[in-house]
Image (spheres, helix red, strand yellow):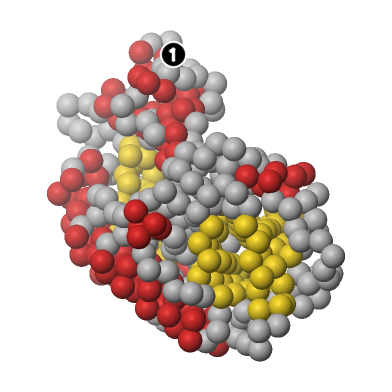
Amino acid sequence: MRFIHIADVHLDTAFAGRSEEVRSRLREAAREAFARCVDTAVSERVHAVLIAGDLFDGPRLSFGSEGVLLRQLAVLAEAGIQVVYATGNHDPGSGPSVQDLAWPDNVTVIAGAESVTVTIVNRGGDPVGYVTGAGHGTARETADLAGGLRPPTATRLPRVALLHTQVTSASGSEPHQAYAPSNPETLRGAGFDYWALGHVHQRQALSADPPVHYPGNLQGRNARETGPKGGLLVSLHDSRHPVVEFREFTRVRWETLAVTGLERARTMDALVERVVDSWERARSPDPGSDRTEWMVTVDLSGPSPVWRKLREQEELEALEQECADCLGAMSVRIRAGGTHATVRLEDHIDRQDALGASLRLCRRVAAGDERLGLAEADLAGFDRERHGSLEAYLRRLLDGADAEIMARMLTDAAGTGAP
């Protein structure tokens, strides 16, 4: 059996906080990535496409995405390719889009926690394998759905499990709620030849025997989801020697670029030159393709003679536009909170005054040793699904705060940054 395993397509993600032009392009790029997945499925003559949840970003699908989705599913039907789709927490089986769409006959939607087994056949109608899955009936599925999945018995054909779940050991699982939580021991001992998982957006193999894989999301949705994105082409012709290959489907990539060494950059041109130089070095081992479109976040940090300008929104926007033009990027966002006056933090952290105490407090928060006496309910902007732990959220919230505190306390009347 050959199939493509994808997950977390998140059609109709809002991409809040971006310009309407960028939001529109990112939403369209997700649809294009799904179409590229379909093209690959047809050209590779796979037997099935497996979707491990979160096909939609919310319970309702826009007309535009609905049209693209149904047209692409019809292409798969024409090619004799089955689709097995197990719902996730963003697109639960009780949602209107899952319930109301006119799904083609080649699509099996597993919309609830009860285990469903689908026989996968070749173009001649002969069985080539089985897919057993469970879906999320609601947006907050807390049961261990993996424990209820059992492979078919009395067969030598490949048996695949399909599930949207957070495996406790998965890397990058911290930002995600523990919906349908499972553990590696349950998965490895269930008797399946392959586990097709979704929910964690970082591509990874949790086990080699049997293969347990997250393909990652089809397209990055924010600055934390960097690198090439796509799906997995899986061959189980010989279940003892499975072949799993990553295929990139999206042309839009998010990347974060750290830029230091700003001490001599006193003009916008000099800053842009530092950004371009850092970008070229970062992209040298991983240049993307000629058609890759880039969403770039630039983290400026360290001492800078123009740190004050980098605190002004108008100046940042001018620098962002210039960097985007020079990099050929769809969008550039610059975070300059890590820049500060040209003094060393280490020279002041042991001071026995308000500055020293503030710097030491920032360091304790960054190390996870201090949560400022705050509970989750005290932070209006905190969302465990998006931010992970409270400690991780506080670290991100106060990132660069030590430099900002020092810059404010040490700047003299002439604005030279001298203590």
The answer to whether residue 115 is left or right of residue 323 is right
Q: Quadrant of residue 412?
A: top left
The type of residue carrying mark 1 is: Gly
Residue 204 screen position, x and y as percent = 63, 57
At label 1, counting other C-alpha atoms closer than 10 Å, the crowd grade (few under 14, some 14-19, many 20 or more) is few
Residue 11 screen position, x and y as percent = 37, 61
Residue at point 39%, 57% (across, down) = 99
Residue at point 71%, 78% (across, down) = 127
Residue 321 screen position, x and y as percent = 22, 62
Residue at point 38%, 11% (across, down) = 353
Q: Quadrant of the C terminus?
A: top left
- Kindly identify which residue carries mark 1: 373
Of residues 271 and 163, the one drawn nearer to the viewer in this rendering: 163
Asked if residue 196 is positioned above or below residue 45 in the image, the reply reads: above
> Would residue 13 be visible to someone looking at this image?
no
Asked if residue 248 is positioned above or below residue 91 in the image, the reply reads: below
> Would residue 155 be visible to someone looking at this image?
yes
Label 1: which secondary element: loop
Q: Quadrant of the N terminus?
A: bottom right
Of residues 294 and 362, the one drawn nearer to the viewer in this rendering: 294
The answer to whether residue 419 is left or right of residue 147 is left
Of residues 217 and 282, the one drawn nearer to the viewer in this rendering: 217
Farthest residue to the left: give it.
314
